[in-house]
Image (cartoon, rainbow, N blue to C red):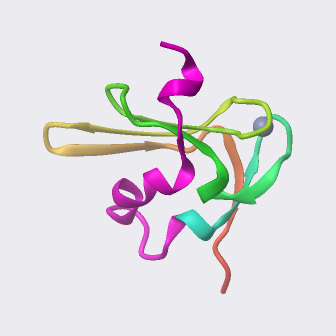
Amino acid sequence: MTPESRRLDGNAAAGQLADVFVFDATVVMTRCSTCGTEAPLGQYHVYADAPGMIVRCPSCEKVVMRVAQTPGHKWLDMGGAATLDIGN
Ligand SMILES: [Zn+2]
């Protein structure tokens, strides 16, 4: 199985991110902290078949976001996202 065969588009992240954000995260302009690519989160690459959900940059494939669920906790790591433009 290749990484590309497991990959979903960023819209696949909508369900899990709806538990975290009060807005539709898939339309939020997101800047990768590694390469500076800016695109709506819905255009990023999502891997949902890991123990958690991994969101990777569509240009450099670095991890920009991870979401994991453990008993009683939901973890969000946005260490690879430089900024999110959430509008006003
Ligand atoms: Zn990147």
Give above or below for 4 relative to 70.
above
59 or 87, nearer to the observer: 59
Query: In this view, which residue lies farthest toward the right?
Result: 36
Indicate the position of residue 25 as horizontal and vertical percent values: 53, 65
Q: Position of residue 44 (x, y in %)?
A: 64, 47
Residue at image position (77%, 41%) is 33
Q: Is residue 84 magenta?
A: no
Q: Residue at x 66, y 53 (%)?
A: 43
Q: Is 80 on the left or on the right of 16, as rendered?
A: right
State whether residue 65 is above or below residue 87: above
Tell whether 27 sits left or right of 57. Answer: left
Q: Quadrant of residue 87?
A: bottom right
The span picked out in magenta is: 1-25
Looking at this view, name the residue that lies furthest to the top: 1
**Residue positioned 66% across, 86% down in the render:** 88
Left or right side of 84 for 67: left
Horizontal and vertical percent for residue 85? Answer: 70, 69
